[in-house]
Amino acid sequence: MDGVTRVPEPANEPVRTYEPGSADARALRSALDTLDGRREDLTQTIGGATRWGGGDEVPVVQPHAHAHLLGTLRQATRDDVTDAISAAAQAAPAWQAMSFADRAAIFLRAAELVAGPWRDTLNAATMLGQSKTVQQAEIDSACELIDFLRFNVHFAERILAEQPNSGGGAWNRFDHRPLEGFVLAITPFNFTAIAGNLPTAPALMGNTVLWKPSPTQQLSAHYFMRVLETAGLPPGVINLLTGDGAAVSEVALTDRNLAGIHFTGSTRTFRHLWESVGRNLDRYAAYPRLVGETGGKDFVVAHPSADVDALHTALVRGAFEYQGQKCSAASRAYLPRSLWEGGLRDRLATTAEELEYGDVRDFRHFGGAVIDRRAFDRLRDVLAKLEADPSCEVLAGGGTDDSVGYFVRPTVVVGTDPTHELFRTEYFGPLLGVHVYEDGKFDEVLDLAADSTPYALTGSIFGRDREALATATERLRFAAGNFYLNDKPTGAVVGQQPFGGARASGTNDKAGSIFNLLRWVSPRTIKETFVPPTDHTYPHMSR
Ligand SMILES: NC(=O)c1ccc[n+]([C@@H]2O[C@H](COP(=O)([O-])OP(=O)(O)OC[C@H]3O[C@@H](n4cnc5c(N)ncnc54)[C@H](O)[C@@H]3O)[C@@H](O)[C@H]2O)c1
Ligand SMILES: N[C@@H](CCC=O)C(=O)O
């Protein structure tokens, strides 16, 4: 059915608080118990049919209790990927022909399913599989995921409404076509919402998709695929492939019909994908769209006029929530000596030492474990190196313990050399580097924040002096795609702080915004002339 429609006005999903004894907390606990005791078959979904990957088995465990198996997946093989590409091609004509209203309704229904009957399951899967506390799961696998689904429909409607001018006896129109071919969505472990957004955003615009989640996010990805099926997504529109991505790279990146890549993950992986596309350009029917949101080395700069209570809270939450495993996490702070020696140093050290990381099934903990053995080993080695470095002082934390889970203590390291790797490398763990500057050197410190790293994802400035805020906002213009004044650099909300960074942090296509959705359409311009001319001569030719 064709016709003009208006989609529902989107609103951000309210964040539930899960106070002890509340009905919400009880319902979530029951979902945790259910998933805890289940060993899920983490199958692929290709053309609407579930099937095991054809490769090696991979266990999915609870990072905070790594002996505890949640489920098993198997690596996708080349045949699996070939079949997924065929399924996407088969589903494409009917999906493209479906009206926008019908496509949109599927994703709006998915949003309501996540907000209602699936909320506890998705939150529990995110807590157990990715070691998120209840608060961190709620803002991710419930609220942000719901927001992506609702707001994208609203942004897509605006794109469809975008039409050229007409006049002079002609009607000009945009046909907002999907891309020709399939979109490859490759998603990270750390946000269930991002994993859900990357395949659904191109699908909403009429594309068919191969979705390859991270193995350590597979449990929540598995349930989100069930949500999409329940919402009525036709078979083959989104095809879920499991595993580490090796076979996906080999087959999909060399396929003639690769139309685009929607990626979030490390800078290294995105560069690998981009290079591979570059090498294979001659194979493709069209230039694949490359959208990638990647790493960060996100800063907090405090002016001597900053409110210390607000700064302290932002540092603790920004650096240590979700164990520092947000691309937006505060990982380098430039703090004035007056505030540092006036009490901030001792306060930050005490708070970091007191933060409790543990099993996320215990709601009293502030954080859980880091995601896996590889992350744990990498962080343990980094901490050992920093401890042995005379230019670094481990002020708090530094400990690791992998006896039960992959635990790394919230760590504050003070570094005297602002060019040290402590202030340049994305460690992706609960590790905050602090550089203390002399109060008069605010301008120099802005230069350090701006240009010490190849990244430009998020950053914060704290201060009460308006002049200082204005100077920092201007000087740091290209240093962060998301810039915060007197707030932590994490926690962007869909529709309010569209998210993404430039330089080595990605293509800055702002997930969950109109800018992102524009990448998944290829407009055709149609001109219809109502009374076409019937004489080829012009007035200047008359004799
Ligand atoms: N900028 C953002 O919006 C944003 C958001 C979340 C995470 N991140 C970044 O993501 C990183 C952490 O996530 P991660 O550890 O999952 O990243 P990662 O790069 O290790 O993995 C991301 C995805 O790529 C897949 N992958 C890895 N190698 C591949 C290959 N050769 N071929 C195909 N697929 C491959 C992985 O299996 C996973 O699904 C951090 O650097 C973080 O800053 C960025
Ligand atoms: N959008 C999230 C970060 C996503 C990356 O991991 C935030 O703003 O904290």
Image (tube, rainbow, N blue to C red):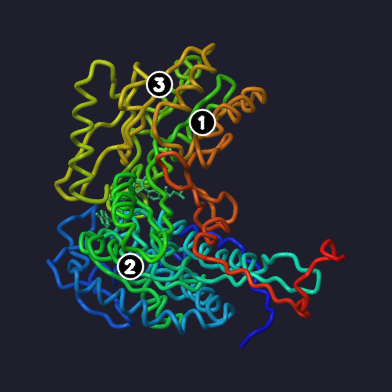
* Quarter assignment of residue 284: bottom left
* Quarter assignment of residue 262: bottom left
Q: Position of residue 340 (x, y in %)?
A: 45, 19
On residue 143, the disc is none
Q: Residue furthest bottom?
A: 1
* Left or right, 61 with reference to 410: left
> Mark 1 near mark 3, Cβ–Cβ under 8 Å?
no
**Residue occupying the point 45% across, 22% down:** 448
On residue 435, the disc is 3
* Left or right, 174 with reference to 21: right
> Mark 2 near mark 1, Cβ–Cβ under 8 Å?
no
Q: Mark 3 or mark 2, which is nearer the start of the sequence?
A: 2
Q: Secondary structure at mark 3?
A: strand
Give the amino acid type for the residue marked by disc 1 in the picture.
Leu
Q: Residue furthest left?
A: 56
Q: CA distance from mark 1 to mark 3?
A: 15 Å
